[in-house]
C-alpha cells in the first residue's frame, strides 16, 4: 500500500529522474570504490582520539575534521554558492523536510536535483526529515510504519515512511543521505520508549537500505541512537556496524541533555564505531563543543548556529560572540577579527556593521554570515593543522583556556572551565589544568 | 575637513553623494516647522535645521551634498502651501550659498529647485537665486509627482515646459557647465525623456525599488541594428520584441514597466534565466524557478540575486544611452526604448 500525498508529489517512475541527474563527477577515483565515498585516516593524535582524514565524495574532496554549514531551504542565509566556495567550504547540509515541501520533489526532479537547482557544485548532505517533523509539527505520531503528521498546508494526515524519506532524498541527490530514525528526546526518562526507538531505528535502517535507489551516487548513513542510556547506545552501534555502510552519524544528542551526559554518550559511540569510517556528529557547532568532540573522535559536524546567529547581528570570534547591535560597537573601527581574512573582515569595520544593523538588514546578515562561516572553516582548519603537527592537545588547551578566561565570558559570569570539558578531555589524555 | 564617508563604507574610490530624503521609500511630506525640515528614519521624525546639517557635513565628508529643501512629491492644490515650502527652502539656500558661510573646497553643494507644479512659485525662487547671485555647479529638481506604488515619477512630459523655463532662468551667460540631477526613480523610458530635457545624473534607486518587490526588469538595453544612424527605427518595428504573457494582469504589468514578478507561482517551474541573453551574474547562474523558491521561502539570497540583475540591466542601458549620444544615434535609441514601454 502506498499513500499518494498531494504535497509530496513523488514520481513513481524512477528511471526518468535518475537520467536527469548528472552522472559524471569530478572524482572518478570513486569508480572502483565499494561506496561513492572514500575515507582515509591520514594522521592520528598521539594522545586523544582525534584524527586527520581525507574524505572523497562525488562532488568534493575534503579533509576532516570539518564543519558543515546548514542551508536549510536550498540556500545559505544570504551567502551565494560562489561565496561559499570562496570560504573554502565544499560541503553543506540541506533539510529534507523543508525541501520536500518547498520546492518539492516534482520540481527538484525537473531541475535535475538540488545541486543543479541551487547551482552548488560542492558536496551536499541531507537529513531524513524525521527530526524536523517531530519537532515542528503538531500531531506528529510515530508508528512502526513511519511518522504520521498533519500537513502544515491543508491539515490532512500524511505519512513519512523510511521508503518515502529515501525517495525524497534520492530526488534531492545529496552525496550523503541519512536514514529515517525514530527520534526521541535525549532527556526522556522513559527507558522503554528509548529502547523501542533505538530498535525501531534499526528496522527502519534496513528498510531504508532496501529502498535506497541510488547506491552508486549517494552514501546512506545510519544514525546511532539510544539517548543517554549507555547500554542501548552500545547495542545500537553494534547493530549498525553489521550493516556495513560507508559511514555513521551519531544522533539523539544535542537536545538539551546535560553536557556531562552528552560527552559520555559521544565518546562511547566513537569507542565502538569502526576507526576506518567517518563519524558525523549531528547538531554540534559551538567552538568548545567542536574541539571536545574532535578529541573524542568525531570527524564532521553540522549546526545552524553560525548562520542563525548572524541573522541577529552576532559575529563569531575565539572569545565567543560579538553582538554588533550593542552601542559599544558604534565607534569601533576595528574589523570583527584581525586574524580573519574573509571578505567582511578585509573590508568593513565593526562600526560600519553596527550602522548597517540599523538600516540594511539584508546586506548585514549576508556580511556577518560570510564571516561566521569563514570563522568555522578557519577553526576547523586550525584543528586539522594541529592534528597534522601532533600539537592538537596544546591547541585545545590554549583555545579553551583563552575562551573561558576572556572578557566575554567574564561578563556573562561564566565560571572558569566547566567540569565537563575538563573531564571529557581528561578521558582522552588531555590535561587542561 | 571631516572624516570621509567613502572610507567608512569601504568605497574610497567612489564619489559620495548625500541626499536629504531616501527616495526609494515613500516618506511623509510636510511635518516641517519654522526653518527646520523633517527627515524620517526608523525612529521616526527628526527636525533638521541649517546649522545641524552644516555641523554634520563638516564632520562627515561627502563629495556632493544636496542642500536641504522643502517640496512635495505629489501635486499640491494650495499655492500658499507651495509658497511656504519655497520660502523654507530659501532660508536653507541663503545659509548654504550666502557669502558669510565658509565654503568647503572638497564638497559640492547642489542647488535645490523647488516650487512643485506651480510656475509662479518656481519663478519667485529662481528670481531670488539670480538676485542673490549664488554660485553653484549642479542643481536638482524637486517637487515632481510620483506614483505611490511604483515610486517612479508619474509623467516626465508634464514638467517639460516648466523645466525649460526654469533652466533658462538659472543659466548664466555662457555657463553651460552646470549639471542637472533627476531625483526620482525612473524607468528607462522616463530616463530617456529626462535626458532629452537636459538631465545628466539620475538616482540609482529604480533597480532597488524593483528588487524590493521581487520583480526583475526584462527590457532590452540595446540593439545593434539601431547603431547605424541611417537606420530608420519604425515606430512599431521593435515592439514585436515584447514578451507576450497569458493573463491580463501580467500583460498589464509587462506593458507598463517591462518587469516580471518573481513572486508569481507560474515561475516555479520556469528553468530559464531572468532575462534571455542577459550576461549578468544572476542570469548566468540562477533560474527563475530557483529565485521564485527563494522569494517564496523568504530567503534573502533572492534579493541579492535580483539586485545584481536589475542593476546590471539598468547600467547596461545607461552605457548604451551614452554611446547613442556620443555616436549620434540617440534618436533611434530613444524610439527603441520608448517603443518597449509604450502603452497601447
Image: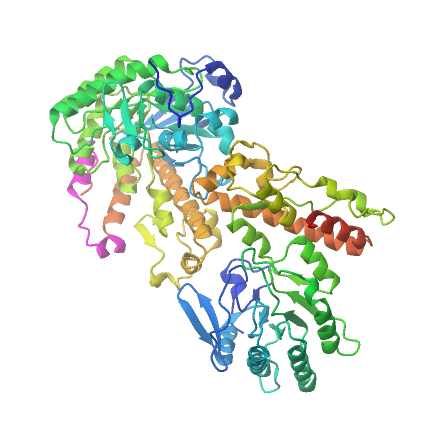
Quadrant of the snapshot with the C terminus of chain A: top left
Residue A254 place in picture, x, y as percent? 24, 35
Residue A247 place in picture, x, y as percent? 33, 21
Q: Does residue A417 belong to the magenta stretch?
A: yes
Residue B197 place in picture, x, y as percent? 73, 64
- Residue B165 higher or lower than B269, as above or below: below
Residue at figure coordinates x 68%, y 62% from the top left: B156
Residue at figure coordinates x 45%, y 19% from the top left: A11
Residue at figure coordinates x 41%, y 52% from the top left: A338
- Residue A341 higher or lower than A303, as above or below: below
Residue B322 place in picture, x, y as percent? 74, 55
Quadrant of the snapshot with the N terminus of chain A: top left
From the viewer's perspective, is B181 left or right of A395? right
- Between B10 and A297, the one lying in front of the other is B10
Specify how the rendered protein is coloured: rainbow
From the viewer's perspective, is B19 left or right of A250? right
Image quadrant in which you'd find residue B180? bottom right
- Residue B141 higher or lower than B243, as above or below: below
- Between A90 and B343, the one lying in front of the other is B343
Residue range (magenta): A407-430
From the viewer's perspective, is A30 left or right of B155? left
Give the number of callouts.
0
- Between A222 and A275, the one lying in front of the other is A222
Q: Does residue A331 belong to the magenta stretch?
A: no
Q: Is residue A374 visible?
A: yes
- Residue B166 higher or lower than A423, as above or below: below
- Between B153 and A237, the one lying in front of the other is B153
Q: Is residue A81 visible?
A: no
Amino acid at each position: 500500500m502506498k499513500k499518494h500525498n498531494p504535497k509530496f508529489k513523488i514520481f513513481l517512475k524512477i528511471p526518468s529522474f535518475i537520467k536527469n541527474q548528472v552522472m559524471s563527477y569530478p572524482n572518478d577515483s570513486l569508480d572502483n570504490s565499494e561506496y561513492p565515498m572514500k575515507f582515509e585516516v591520514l594522521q592520528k593524535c598521539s594522545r586523544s582520539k582525534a584524527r586527520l582524514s581525507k574524505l572523497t565524495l562525488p562532488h568534493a574532496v575534503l579533509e576532516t575534521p570539518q564543519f558543515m554549514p546548514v542551508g536549510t531551504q536550498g540556500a545559505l542565509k544570504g551567502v551565494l554558492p560562489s561565496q561559499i566556495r570562496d570560504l573554502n567550504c565544499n560541503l553543506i547540509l540541506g533539510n529534507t523536510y523543508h525541501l520536500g515541501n518547498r520546492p518539492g520533489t516534482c520540481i527538484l526532479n525537473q531541475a535535475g536535483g538540488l545541486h543543479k537547482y541551487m547551482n552548488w557544485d560542492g558536496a551536499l548532505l541531507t537529513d531524513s526529515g524525521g527530526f524536523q517533523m517531530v519537532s515542528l509539527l503538531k500531531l506528529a505520531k510515530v508508528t512502526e510504519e513511519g511518522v504520521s503528521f498533519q500537513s502544515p498546508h491543508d491539515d490532512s494526515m500524511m505519512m513519512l515512511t523510511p521508503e518515502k524519506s529515501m525517495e525524497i532524498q534520492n530526488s534531492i541527490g545529496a552525496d550523503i543521505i541519512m536514514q529515517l530514525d525514530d527520534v526521541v528526546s535525549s532527556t526522556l526518562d522513559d527507558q522503554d520508549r528509548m529502547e523501542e526507538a533505538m530498535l525501531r531505528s534499526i528496522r527502519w535502517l534496513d528498510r531504508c537500505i532496501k529502498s535506497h535507489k541510488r547506491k552508486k551516487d549517494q552514501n546512506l548513513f545510519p544514525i546511532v541512537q539510544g539517548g543517554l542510556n549507555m547500554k542501548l547506545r552500545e547495542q545500537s552501534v553494534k547493530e549498525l556496524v553489521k550493516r556495513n555502510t560507508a559511514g555513521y552519524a551519531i544522533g539523539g544528542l544535542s537536545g538539551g541533555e546535560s553536557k556531562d551526559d552528552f560527552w559520555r554518550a559521544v565518546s562511547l559511540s566513537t569507542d565502538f564505531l569502526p576507526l576506518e569510517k567517518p563519524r558525523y556528529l549531528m547538531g554540534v557547532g559551538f567552538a568548545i563543543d567542536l574541539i571536545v568532540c574532535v578529541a573524542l573522535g568525531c570527524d564532521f559536524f553540522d549546526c545552524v548556529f553560525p548562520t542563525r546567529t548572524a541573522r541577529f547581528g552576532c559575529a563569531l570570534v575565539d572569545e565567543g560572540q560579538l553582538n554588533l547591535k550593542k552601542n559599544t560597537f558604534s565607534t569601533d573601527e576595528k574589523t570583527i577579527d584581525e586574524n580573519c581574512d574573509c571578505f567582511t573582515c578585509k573590508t568593513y569595520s565593526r562600526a560600519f556593521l553596527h550602522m548597517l544593523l540599523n538600516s540594511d538588514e539584508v546586506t548585514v546578515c549576508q556580511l556577518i554570515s560570510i564571516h561566521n562561516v569563514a570563522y568555522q572553516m578557519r577553526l576547523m582548519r586550525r584543528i586539522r593543522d594541529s592534528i597534522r603537527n601532533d600539537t592538537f592537545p596544546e591547541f585545545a588547551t590554549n583555545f579553551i583556556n583563552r575562551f573561558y578566561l576572556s572578557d566575554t565570558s567574564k561578563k556573562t559570569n561564566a565560571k572558569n572551565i566547566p567540569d565537563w570539558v575538563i573531564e571529557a578531555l581528561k578521558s582522552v589524555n588531555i590535561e587542561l589544568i | 575637513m571631516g572624516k570621509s564617508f567613502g572610507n567608512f563604507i569601504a568605497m574610497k574610490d567612489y564619489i559620495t553623494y548625500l541626499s536629504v530624503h531616501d527616495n526609494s521609500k515613500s516618506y511623509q511630506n510636510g511635518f516641517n516647522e519654522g526653518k527646520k525640515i523633517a527627515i524620517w528614519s526608523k525612529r521616526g521624525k527628526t527636525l533638521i535645521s541649517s546649522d545641524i546639517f552644516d555641523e554634520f557635513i563638516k564632520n562627515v565628508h561627502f563629495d556632493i551634498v544636496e542642500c536641504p529643501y522643502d517640496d512635495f512629491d505629489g501635486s499640491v492644490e494650495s499655492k500658499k502651501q507651495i509658497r511656504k515650502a519655497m520660502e523654507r527652502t530659501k532660508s536653507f539656500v541663503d545659509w548654504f550659498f550666502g557669502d558669510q558661510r565658509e565654503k568647503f573646497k572638497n564638497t559640492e553643494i547642489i542647488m535645490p529647485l523647488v516650487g512643485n507644479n506651480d510656475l509662479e512659485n518656481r519663478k519667485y525662487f529662481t528670481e531670488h537665486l539670480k538676485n542673490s547671485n549664488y554660485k553653484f555647479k549642479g542643481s536638482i529638481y524637486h517637487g515632481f509627482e510620483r506614483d505611490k506604488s511604483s515610486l517612479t515619477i508619474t509623467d516626465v512630459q508634464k514638467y517639460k515646459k516648466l523645466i525649460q523655463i526654469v533652466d533658462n532662468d538659472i543659466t548664466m551667460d555662457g555657463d553651460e557647465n552646470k549639471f542637472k540631477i533627476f531625483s526620482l526613480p525612473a524607468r528607462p523610458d522616463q530616463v530617456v525623456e529626462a535626458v532629452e530635457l537636459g538631465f545628466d545624473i539620475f538616482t540609482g534607486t529604480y533597480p532597488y525599488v524593483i528588487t524590493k518587490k521581487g520583480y526583475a526588469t526584462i527590457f532590452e538595453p540595446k540593439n545593434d541594428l539601431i547603431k547605424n544612424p541611417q537606420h530608420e527605427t519604425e515606430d512599431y518595428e521593435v515592439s514585436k520584441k515584447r514578451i507576450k504573457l497569458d493573463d491580463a494582469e501580467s500583460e498589464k504589468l509587462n506593458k507598463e514597466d517591462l518587469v516580471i514578478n518573481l513572486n508569481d507561482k507560474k515561475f516555479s517551474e520556469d528553468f530559464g534565466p531572468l532575462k534571455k541573453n542577459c550576461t549578468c551574474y544572476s542570469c548566468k547562474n540562477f533560474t527563475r524557478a530557483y529565485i521564485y523558491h527563494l522569494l517564496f521561502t523568504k530567503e534573502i539570497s533572492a534579493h541579492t540575486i535580483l539586485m545584481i540583475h536589475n542593476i546590471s540591466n539598468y547600467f547596461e542601458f545607461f552605457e548604451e544611452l551614452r554611446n547613442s549620444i556620443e555616436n549620434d544615434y540617440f534618436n533611434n535609441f530613444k524610439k527603441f526604448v520608448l517603443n518597449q514601454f509604450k502603452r497601447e
